[in-house]
Amino acid sequence: MAKVESEKVTNTVGTFCSYDTLWKKRKNLSGRQVAKVEPEKVPDTVGTFCIYNPFINLNQLKYSKVKAAVYRGKEEILVEEVGMPSLDEGEILLEIEACNVCGTDLRTYRHGDKKITPPRILGHEFCGRVVESRSSATDIKVGDRVLMYIVLSCGECRYCKAGRENLCQNRTTMSYHLDGAFAPYMKVPAKAIRRKQLFKVNEDMPSEYLSLAEPLGCVINAHGRGRLEVGLKDKVAIIGAGPIGVMHGLVSRFQGAQQVDIYDVMQTRLEKAAQFDIDNVVKVDKENGHLERALELTEGLGYDVVIVAVSVAQAQADALEIAGKAGRVEFFGGLPKTNPFATLNTNHLHYKELRISGSYSEKMSDFQAATALVQKKNFPSDKIVTHTLSLDRITEAFTLMESGEALKVSIKPNL
């Protein structure tokens, strides 16, 4: 690729130049702007550098401050100024269009997380657009709209070699060990790019809908071979009517389940769940009326599949009660680490011949499947994402989630 002289870097659409050449000449370009670069005009060349957004000042891009939601400790997420991410060779910079709030973010805010060393920018359910690339190891180009598989595995341990990179002994994760996407910009590590962990997505769908791919991939992981394997003959119960529970219901229906019922203690959440393709919503009560209702809804047999989509010990115990003979039970949500114990009637395992499984995170194949599914017109993302907030209102998202008023809240860092 020929070097472009500084005087040729003009305000003309389609102008491009070598990254190294451009930054070597940055003093000569101080205060000048590069207009929007059409993605198709960006050459597939080592060292390509372009600015996608129109009229971004090059010096400002490298040295300016931006606002981000920074985790500083328990009940302390502050929106404060941070420096723009600086790229090393092989990395990519994303402009974040949307980052949805996960239940994990809420739990981290309320209780802290020992895996996270503050200060850390949180946010791992995101959609972004490539605005800068220093990588020659990918076909992802400046201007591409992408989702990211956020697990950075070692590729060497026994679990990685078995294709279960979500269980990697040496894994790191965006938002936990590396800064996440509750910010206008986020850099993608070179390792993720080399392993093709960025997935192009279409231009037509809102970014907050596309960002559902990350939690949906975790749901799909639970439905894989050797676990739930929901089919046409199955009656499915889901305990927990949050966004994860709803997505379990949707995936079960896509897989052909003949009946899908959702249980929850909160009436507001059940009312939202009833808007989806759900057969019955059942209020959980202290008198165990919901256990009797489960028998009524299954002709006294119990459910073929029971999915626990809440981090509550009693829900795990209830799952064994409402499961039918030869049923499959999934403990999707982990219990609080301060009290990770549940009292279970294990006779149900013995006499009913139950199969219990757990699932954690997602494999890249699960994320790929989720990325395809969220782009389908029949996936009801518009009902799952109920609220959109600006970055400076991020703590309001936690209140909305806890009250049951919101299913999924999306943060728009550039609002």
Image (cartoon, helix red, strand yellow):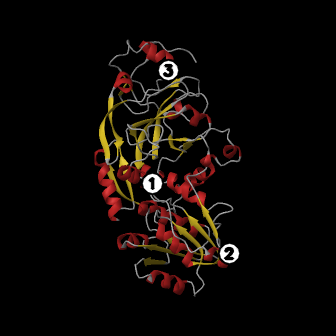
Which numbered disc, 1 or 3, marks the residue that appears first in the sequence?
A: 3
Q: Earlier in the sequence, mark 1 or mark 2?
A: 1
Residue beneath the point at 71% across and 47% down: 162
In the image, residue 19 above or below residue 215: above
Question: At label 1, which amino acid type do we have?
Answer: Tyr
Say which of 21 and 412 sits in front.
412
Q: Is 85 situated left or right of 229 in this image?
A: left
Relative to the observer, which residue lies in front, 62 or 203? 62
Q: Which mark is residue 209?
A: 1
Q: Nearer the viewer, mark 3 or mark 2?
A: 2
Residue 353: numbered disc: 2
For the residue marked with disc 3, what is the amino acid?
A: Tyr
Specify the amino acid type for callout 2. Glu
Residue toward you, 150 or 136: 150
Q: Secondary structure at mark 1?
A: helix
All told, the count of numbered labels is 3
Q: Counting other residues with Cα less than 10 Å from the Cα at mark 2, is it few (<14), some (14-19), or many (20 or more)?
A: some
User: From the viewer's perspective, is 153 left or right of 334?
Assistant: right
Q: Which residue is mark 3?
A: 19
| Mark 3 neighbour class, 10 Å CA radius: few under 14, some 14 to 19, many 20 or more | some
